[in-house]
Image: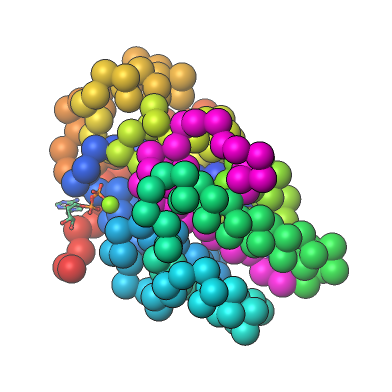
Amino acid sequence: MITKDLEVISVFGARGGGKTTLVMELLAQGQRQRVIVYDLKDEYRFKKIRGKAALWKFLKQNWYRDFKISYVPDARETPEHVKELSDICFAIAKGQKADESKGKGKNITILVEEMSVTAPNQRYPAGMGGFPYVVNVAREWGVEVIGVSQRPAQANPDFRGNSTLNYYFHLSDRNDVQAVKAKLGSQAEDLKTLERGDYIKFHSGMITRGKTKPRRR
Ligand SMILES: Nc1ncnc2c1ncn2[C@@H]1O[C@H](COP(=O)(O)OP(=O)(O)O)[C@@H](O)[C@H]1O
Ligand SMILES: [Mg+2]
């Protein structure tokens, strides 16, 4: 069943802090049954789909099944990623919207890694706004978005503004610490001293702390 008002989840922190480890924990939770990772670095060990033609074929054949897939994009440079991710987001939003109106289908999670490259803080050209479109409206149609970045200040602002559940790992860059002060207030300063795996979670106005469980690669 499609659920409305799914979260937009941000995971921010410096390289090696534990972001991907946390994301894997989130994806292992039972409620996430359809997952597509925009896997820039080709690091997720799900079924790999390379290139858009293969992706459309897979989605057409498996749309009403459960799946976790790692989509390795064709794009290399940021403008190409913006376009490619946009096309994928529009296609998924369209499918979910149609399902929701017919009372069928299931939720889907879109995970976007390395947002400073794939969903950057820039103005997107006309027709390439699929990612901000999804974070602005698609939660109504059972779309959950998880975005990961080393640089919160460089991630898409619609995403940041719509994020409802935020995880922060170690951050040291002053601009990045500044960028998360709106959510964490003075606790943003604590991000500078977090150790590997430690995070601060912000959800519904509540700030809590946690730690990832290291896994074997
Ligand atoms: N709580 C933890 N304690 C020790 N090592 C951890 C912990 N959580 C994650 N790690 C390890 O730290 C490394 C970096 O984690 P990763 O999730 O890849 O970080 P990021 O995605 O932020 O770059 C990995 O080798 C991971 O297994
Ligand atoms: Mg990572």
Residue 2 point in image, percent of width and height: 71, 63
Q: Residue at x 68, y 50 (%)?
A: 138
Question: As rendered, which of 89 and 205 lies closer to the eye?
Answer: 89
Residue 82 point in image, percent of width and height: 51, 47
Question: As rendered, which of 140 and 41 lies closer to the eye?
Answer: 41
Q: Is residue 38 visible?
A: yes
Q: Residue at x 25, y 30 (%)?
A: 171
> In this image, 32 relative to 143: left or right?
left
Look at the image and say whether residue 108 sits in the magenta stretch: yes
Name the quadrant of the C terminus. Answer: bottom left
Above-or-below relation of 60 to 109: below
Residue 18 point in image, percent of width and height: 24, 48
In the image as oriented, which residue stretches furthest toward the right?
A: 102
Residue 17, image quadrant: top left
* Magenta region: 105-130
Residue 154, image quadrant: top left
